[in-house]
């Protein structure tokens, strides 16, 4: 169906409005980070990198960013490993136990984060596990596990059993089949699931608030700063995080795009 010019113009305006509403507010802190400020007011006539210098000397923010990267990387890696193992197990046959397992994997993600966080908090308290970055990693892994599992499971089901059965018929062991057949076919899926899982972990606040100890992640640190207001160096942090996010998105697109697309200049 071909749309008329007025309809195309209306769709273009709606798309533009959505982009402005989503990304417009992000322009202000990014632009503000390149100007000096005084008493909360941005001095537009005085370009400056003072915000970035202040950020480099803000040990609290830098430590929170470092903790966030540790938690996100560890939780993503664990969720990919466990998700792959669970997906392989689920594809191995049909049984009530496998359906119960799948329900248990999805439940923490479907529940409100505060319920998942409270359940983990009670578990850590009953087992006398001190709250630390380790408990945060466990909480994030439980939360993002469902995403990794579902994405990997869909890819395995799309592969079908033919290649695996052919590999077994040719004398390959289960380990050889996994390394040479299954894992290469899961490469793009693991990258996509890892990026999505890391993004969810980076942004997670409620579960982190309930299971964290004295070491804060970036969302928790920013949540605490909201009561007193943000300092100018937060504008620099926003600009850097968005820049790194854009770079990661470009890398992900190049990795996940069909090989023919990457050859086009």
Image (tube, rainbow, N blue to C red):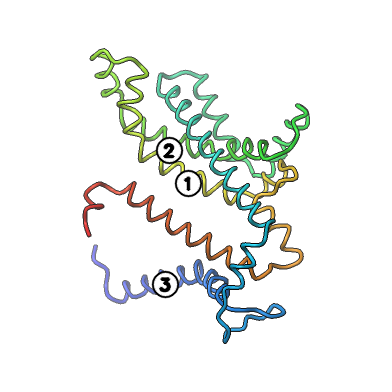
Q: Which residue is mark 1?
A: 196
For marks 2 and 1 on the same chain, the one whose residue lies earlier in the sequence: 2
Q: Is residue 86 above or below residue 249?
A: above
Q: Residue at x 33, y 20 (%)?
A: 176
Q: Where does the image place residue 112, in percent across and percent down from the top left?
A: 64, 44
Q: Is residue 151 above or below residue 3?
A: above
Residue 16 badge: 3
Q: Would you identify the image quadrant in which residue 125 lies? A: top right
Q: Would you identify the image quadrant in which residue 89 lies? A: top left
Q: Where does the image place residue 204, in percent across and percent down from the top left?
A: 61, 48
Q: Disc 2 on helix, strand or loop?
A: helix
Q: Is residue 195 left or right of residue 36?
A: left
Q: Is residue 178 above or below residue 168?
A: below
Q: Where does the image place residue 260, in percent across and percent down from the top left?
A: 21, 49
Q: In the rendered view of the protein, which quadrant contains the N terminus?
A: bottom left
* Front residue of 260 and 121: 260
Q: Where does the image place residue 209, in percent across and percent down from the top left?
A: 71, 47
Q: Which residue is mark 2?
A: 151
Q: Is residue 102 left or right of residue 263?
A: right
**Mark 2 or 1, which is nearer the eye?**
1
Q: Disc 1 on helix, strand or loop?
A: helix
**Pointer 2 and pointer 1: residues touching (CB < 8 Å)?**
yes
Q: Residue at x 60, y 48 (%)?
A: 68
């Amino acid at each position: 169906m071909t749309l008329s010019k007025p309809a195309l113009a209306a769709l273009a305006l709606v798309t533009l409005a959505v982009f402005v509403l989503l990304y417009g507010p992000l322009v202000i802190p990014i632009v503000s980070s390149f100007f000096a400020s005084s008493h909360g007011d941005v001095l537009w006539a005085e370009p400056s990198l003072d915000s970035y210098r202040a950020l480099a000397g803000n040990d609290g923010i830098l430590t929170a960013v470092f903790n966030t990267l540790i938690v996100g990387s560890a939780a993503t890696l664990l969720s990919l490993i466990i998700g792959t193992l669970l997906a392989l197990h689920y594809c191995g046959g049909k049984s009530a136990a496998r359906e119960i397992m799948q329900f248990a994997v999805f439940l923490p993600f479907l529940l409100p984060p505060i319920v998942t966080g409270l359940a983990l908090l009670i578990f850590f308290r009953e087992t006398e596990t001190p709250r630390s970055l380790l408990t945060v990693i466990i909480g994030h892994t439980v939360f993002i596990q469902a995403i990794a599992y579902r994405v990997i499971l869909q890819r395995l089901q799309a592969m079908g059993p033919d290649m695996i059965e052919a590999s077994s018929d040719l004398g390959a062991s289960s380990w050889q089949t996994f390394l040479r057949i299954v894992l290469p076919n899961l490469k793009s899926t693991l990258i996509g699931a890892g990026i999505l899982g890391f993004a969810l972990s980076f942004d997670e606040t409620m579960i982190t608030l309930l299971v964290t100890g004295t070491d804060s992640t970036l969302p928790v640190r920013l949540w605490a700063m909201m009561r007193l207001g943000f300092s100018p160096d937060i504008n620099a942090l926003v600009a850097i995080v968005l820049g790194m996010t854009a770079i990661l998105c470009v890398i992900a697109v190049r990795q996940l795009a069909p090989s023919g697309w990457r050859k086009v200049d």
